[in-house]
Image (spheres, grey):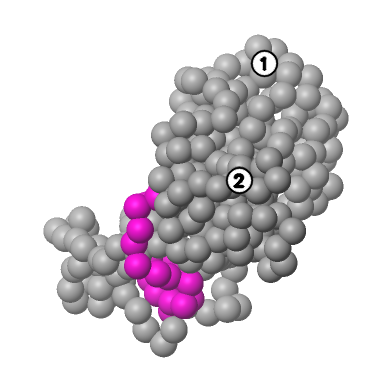
């Protein structure tokens, strides 16, 4: 059976790429749109009570397969995740020119940090820049749809702040743990890994089981070093060094550093031992 997280299909409708693989009333290419809110939960069903599978961020592109009763059924362009979100958070597509590389920043009403009414946005948000301005020595980029962002908090699409995923991951230390989160306001274990890789130019799948399948170079526990990944059933963390695990976790409810041996003992007591040690090809 196809994974409903990555393949858009229902009895009445399915994405065009699945024609011949699934049965559906009709098939569609979908229409392009983008996210117009700072963060948006993506849910498995069109219900507020449904759990959060993941989040989409400002400016990210989606394909919209269906709109009904205030909900939209979409597929994220970045990682292929499928789900439902409120139709009101969608806007017309706009080609992004920059992405946010600070863990968190603000969209100000204009190029002045003293102006009230700024909106907080996360690392990974995508922006379309129409110009620049400077106020009291601080440079801003101006957004095509209005507003301004600190220039040093952004980079052009295709440029990245680091080649080291751990350098990115440590910027999220003490960020609250949020099931399904993938932003600077709340993040889960696989969201942290995905963001750390994305900000070094490496696109990887969203969930820990997908990441487990994606990274195939097995290593022994004794060989662990900076940048390696450790998987448990339903959990993943990054090694900051041979003895330190960095992970978003439900124990501290934050992104935290933890002695690796202590983490293995603690997690093993409640759940099980690690299922794999993997070395990303960076």
**Relative image position of residue 73 (x, y in whole percent):** 38, 71
State the residue position of label 2: 134
State the residue position of label 1: 225
Q: Residue at x 51, y 58 (%)?
A: 58
Q: Is residue 257 above or below residue 62?
A: above
**Screen quadrant of the N terminus:** bottom left
- Left or right: 203 in relation to 268: left
Q: Is residue 115 above or below residue 191?
A: below
Q: Earlier in the sequence, mark 1 or mark 2?
A: 2
**Relative image position of residue 193 (x, y in whole percent):** 59, 38
Q: Residue at x 68, y 40 (%)?
A: 137
Q: Helix or strand or loop: what does disc 1 sit on? A: loop
Q: In the rendered image, which quarter is residue 9 located in?
A: bottom left
Q: CA–CA distance between discs 1 and 2?
A: 43 Å
Pointer 2 local density, CA inside 10 Å: few below 14, some 14–19, many at least 20: few
Q: Is residue 183 visible in the rendered structure shown here?
A: no
Which stretch did the figure color magenta? 71-96
- Left or right: 27 in relation to 71: left
**Relative image position of residue 12 (x, y in whole percent):** 25, 77
Q: Is residue 175 above or below residue 203?
A: below
Q: In the rendered image, which quarter is residue 226 located in?
A: top right
Q: Residue furthest top?
A: 223
In the rendered image, residue 101 lying in the magenta stretch gets the answer: no
Q: Residue furthest bottom?
A: 69
In the rendered image, residue 93 lying in the magenta stretch gets the answer: yes
Nearest the eye: 86 or 105? 105
Q: Residue furthest left?
A: 20
Q: Residue at x 71, y 55 (%)?
A: 113
**Relative image position of residue 176 (x, y in whole percent):** 76, 52
């Amino acid at each position: 059976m196809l994974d409903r997280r990555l393949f858009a299909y229902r009895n009445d409708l399915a994405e065009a790429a699945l024609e011949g693989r699934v049965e559906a009333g009709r098939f569609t290419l979908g229409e392009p749109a983008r996210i117009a809110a700072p963060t948006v939960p993506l849910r498995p069903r069109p219900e507020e009570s449904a759990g959060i599978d993941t989040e989409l961020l400002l400016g990210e592109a989606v394909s919209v397969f269906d709109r009904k009763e205030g909900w939209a059924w979409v597929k994220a362009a970045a990682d292929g995740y499928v789900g439902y979100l409120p139709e009101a958070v969608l806007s017309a597509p706009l080609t992004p020119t920059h992405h946010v590389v600070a863990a968190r920043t603000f969209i100000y009403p204009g190029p002045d940090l003293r102006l009230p009414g700024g909106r907080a946005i996360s690392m990974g948000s995508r922006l379309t820049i129409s110009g620049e301005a400077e106020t009291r020595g601080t440079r801003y980029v101006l957004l095509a749809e209005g507003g301004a962002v600190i220039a040093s908090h952004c980079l052009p699409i295709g440029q990245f702040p680091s080649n080291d995923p751990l350098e990115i991951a440590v910027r999220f230390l003490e960020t609250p743990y949020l099931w399904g989160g993938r932003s600077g306001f709340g993040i889960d274990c696989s969201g942290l890994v995905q963001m750390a890789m994305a900000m070094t130019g490496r696109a990887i799948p969203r969930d820990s089981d997908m990441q487990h399948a994606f990274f195939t170079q097995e290593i022994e526990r004794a060989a662990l070093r900076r940048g390696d990944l450790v998987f448990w059933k339903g959990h993943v963390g990054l090694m900051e060094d041979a003895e330190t695990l960095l992970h978003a976790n439900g124990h501290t409810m934050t992104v935290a550093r933890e002695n690796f041996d202590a983490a293995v003992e603690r997690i093993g007591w409640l759940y099980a031992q690690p299922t794999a040690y993997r070395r990303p090809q960076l």
